[in-house]
Structure formats: C-alpha cells, structure tokens
Amino acid sequence: MAAMQQESAIRTSRAARVLIYLLLLLFAFFYLLPLFVMGVNSVKPLSEITGGNMMALPEIWTLEPWRKAWSEAQVGVQATGLKPYFWNSIKMVVPAVFISTILGALNGYVLTKWRFRGDTILFGLMLFACFIPFQIVLIPMARMLGIFGLAGTTWGLVLVHVVYGIGFTTLYFRNYYAAFPTELVRAAQIDGAGFFQIFWRIMLPSSGPIIVVSVIWQFTNIWNDFLFGASFADFSSQPMTVALNNLVQSSTGVKEYNVHFAGAILAALPTLLVYVVAGRFFVRGLMAGSVKG
Amino acid sequence: MAAPVDADFRTRLQVWLPKLVLSPSLAMALVFVYGFILFTVYLSFTDSRILPSFGWVGFENYSKLFRLRHWEIAVTNMGVFAILYMLICTAIGLALAIFFDQKIRGEGILRPIYLYPMALSFIVTGTAWKWMLDPGIGLENTMHALGWESFAFDWIKNRNFAIYTVVLAAVWQTSGFVMAMFLAGLRGIDNEILKAAQIDGASNWNLYRRIIIPQLRPAFLSAFVILAHLAIKTYDLVIALTGGGPGRATELPATFMYSYTFTRNQMGIGAASATIMLMTIAAIMIPYLYSELRERK
C-alpha cells in the first residue's frame, strides 16, 4: 500500500485541473446513479414510480416495499419473501468460506515452505481451475451431486464453492507466505517443531492480512454466485441471487418495481457491508502479499 | 523399546505430511476440474439428449452447432460485447487512473465510489439497469416527466441495440476495478525518470505517451486477461438484464449452453458449446499463467 501513497511528479495547469475534477465528479455520478435509483424507488409507493419520475425523491415515504420484499413477496411459487433465501445464502456462504480459506492456507504453506519437485506445475493446475468457464463442469457436477444425494442441498453448494474456490485462496496464501522468512520455519524445525506445530504457532498468527483478503474474496464471490445456485439448488437451498432473479422475472401479476429495488438492495447489502467495513484491508492485504510475488 | 521405530515413523510422516495435506485439494482439482472437463468433452462427441448417453457420433455435434443460427448469433454478440466491453473498460480505467494521479483532493472519497459496484452481484446490477433503462418507468419516462416529450431511449427493447445495454451495465460494474489496477501500476513508476524528462522540456502528453503508458504494460496485460475471461463467462448479467432477449438479441455462448443443455434437451450440442468456451479461455489463460509462474521462480 506504500506505493499507493507516492505522489506523481506530473504538474498540470489550472484549467486542466478543473476539467479533471468535473470529469471525476461526472463518473462518480455515473457509479452512484443505480444505487440512488434503487434506494429512492424502494421507499416510494408503486404509483409514484409508474406515474412519476425515477430520479425524484418520494412524495410519500414508505417502508412497505422493504417489508414486502423481505417477508411477503411472491418468489417462485410461494409468497415467502426473500427471507428464507437470505438464510440459505448465509448457511451456504459461512462454511464454504471457512473451509476454502483453511485449505488455501494449508496449501499455500506446503507450496512455499515444503517445496518438492513439480510443485509449481501442481499449483498451475489448481490455478487454472479458477478461470474455467463453469459451463464445462455443469453436466458432470449435476450427475455427481445426484449420485451422492447432495443435489438440491446446501451442502452440495458448499462442496461446489469450496472446489472452485481453493484455487484463488491457495494463490493468495502462496504469494503471502512466499514473502515469509523460510529461516524461521527451518529454525523451528531444528528445535523439533513438526509440520502442524509450525503452521499453528508460526504461520497462522502472522497471516491476519491475507486471511482478511481470502475471506472477503470468497464471501463476495460465493454470495454473488448465480450459476451454481440456479443449476444445483432447490427451494430449501436456493441462494439470494436466484431468489431475487425469480422475484424480478416473475411474469404473474403487477410488476412491483419498488419491491424489486428493495429486494436488490437486500441481496447487495451483505457484500456492500463487507466492502465498506473491510475494503481498505482488502487492498492492503493484497499489497502485503505481492511484495515479493 | 519401540522408540527407534516410532521415531523413524515420525520422521517419515513429517516427510510425507506436506504432500498428504496438499492431496485432498489436488484430488478435488483432478476430479472436479480436469475429470469433469474430460467428461464434458467426451459428451460433446456423443448422442446425449436429455441425459448423458455414450453413443459415439464423432464431430456431428460440432458441425450441427456451427450450422445453428442461434449459435452464430451468440458468437457474434460475444464478439461485439467482448470488444466494446474490454476497450471501454480499459479506456475509462486508464483515464480515471491518470486523473487520480494528478494529486487529486478527495481521492479517498471518490475511489470507493468507483470501486463499490465490483462488490455487487451481477443479478443486482442487472436488476437495477433493467428498470433504469426500461422505457416505461426508467430514463425515457423520467425525461418525459421532466418535460422532454420527444426523448426516446428504448435500446433495451430494441433488437439492434440491446447488446449495448449489456455493455453499459458490465462497464459500470468493472471499470472502477480496472482503474484500481492501472492506478497501482502508475504509483509504481519511478518519479526520477519523469523529473528528468520534465527538465528536458517534455510535455505532459509526451510524458504519458512515451514514458508512462509504455511502462504500464504489465497492468494492460492483467487487465486484458481479467476482462477477457470475465467477458467470456458473462451469464448472470444477461439473465437479469435482458434474459437473452428481445428475441435472441443478447444471447451469449453461456446462455446458449445453458438453454441447449437444460431446457432444450440437446446435451451433446450444449457440451460442444461449453468445450468451445473452454478452449477460448484456455487460449488466453494458459500462456498468461505459464509466463507468470515461470517469472516467479
């Protein structure tokens, strides 16, 4: 992150600076616009949206759309609101993030401190897995989950997200541990510390920044996933993204735009919260890892 | 008395332990990634319809696929989408990064505003833009309400223009992230060279064109690889924004694969389209990963 603070030597004229500020503000407007539209229209009665102007503040403020989106709206066949799906997502995300982070840490530790012939090739194989278009695994994965009785379950989705997430978590921990002094590990080994002792006592206590990176990354990716949720889940396990899409696309009845907007914000809230609270640590941790990368 | 054997066992265990710890992850990658890829590629040469079946048909699925108008549309849309998306994201990302590099006040406030869309799900982004671009309630309706009666903006409902709305929403979501990549690159450039060039009388334009931008090569490369891979994988955004429509106007290979495999019961053709998607990504990713991992040694 130190590099981020370095000031450029470029000097610009006053007129150029005014123009730059105007453009920067214009882009800030562009990036904030959808959030503003979603927010404002989620607290309006429906008639103000269909009859009025999307940019206007509400004449009558109401939290009814939020209540409806959360606990009453028609999602798929049932009028349950988004609430059960929100919990489905939580039940899926928490174990998947935990398991993939632990596995990534162990893998990174092995790949940097216990190197062996061919380890880079193995890492390359795991890393490539992050970038495959998941369409290529959908058919066999559906079969496999069916065979093991995991089709339509939260644990099935946890498995899927762990499998396709460990490439990234391994990458993060590997880069981070590469900068960690190997002499410390060797010294501990001479003192008689074993493989796991070194991991628990030496590596993990200094892994704070990269654990934050891994957790944020995995949380955001898994929470936001749609393809796996849409392919492998049923009512008891469908995540929030799938439910939101069902809510918005449902063709029956009146389109309640205000409820859709409230639902979209509900689906976005957890990742936005993580971003606002921990976004700074994400960039910082990423930089800490890539020092020697 | 069993101590020597025990100690020997423990040393041997310590030698094997690292590989043992790595093996579950590796096994998962071998089965769920490489095994599954082989299975899908194999299916693309079979007569699978609603369920996998193993009657070998050679390249029939591929020749059928390339004769399908539907696939041709999906590939053409991918071309238009990917080129515009990558160019616009790179242009906006680079421009914003260069602006930020001019000792801007309030960078700490603006940067998170540019970056937050990255934290959202494509389904949320798609929903927001779907209604914002909807002529009935969105921008067009707003302009009419404000008194500009002749204003028309119906791209999302227009077969010839709908694909550009997908570009717009995708650019909104990722251009801030590209900005961050270029900014990190810019902040890593040695100021001494710039000062020397300034003393020699180089203009800002020349500084950027001759010295700074050429030094951003690694950032350009990473941006290209990440954007290309995101473009090819684009699925959720189209589903939420347009559902592939109007008609087939925003159909992409990812949506094509899903509908042929799971709703039209043409699994062989679906598998063939997935194989082509994989090969496209592999052609970009493998050389990149290879050079990255070699450099690190």
Image (tube, helix red, strand yellow):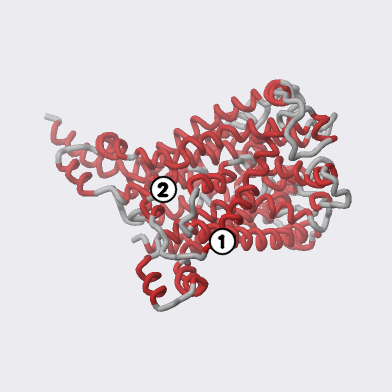
Q: Nearer the viewer, residue B84 or B271?
A: B84
Q: Which residue is mark 2?
A: A286
The single residue placed furthest to the front in the displayed view is: A14
Which chain letter goes with mark 2? Answer: A
Quarter holding residue B141 = top right
Q: Secondary structure at mark 2?
A: helix
> Which residue type does callout 1 highlight?
Ala
At 35% from the left and 38% from the top, the residue drawn is A208
Residue B42 visible in the picture = no
Measured as percent of width and height from the top left, residue B51 is found at 71, 43
Residue B273 vertical position relative to residue A162 in the rendered view, above or below: below
> Which residue type does callout 2 highlight?
Leu
Which chain letter goes with mark 1? Answer: B
Specify whether B92 is left or right of A77.
left
Q: Residues within 10 Å of mark 1 (few under 14, many from 20)?
A: some
Residue B28 visible in the picture = yes
Specify whether A177 is left or right of B163.
left
Q: Which residue is mark 1?
A: B95
Measured as percent of width and height from the top left, residue A145 is found at 59, 35
The single residue placed furthest to the right in the displayed view is: B150
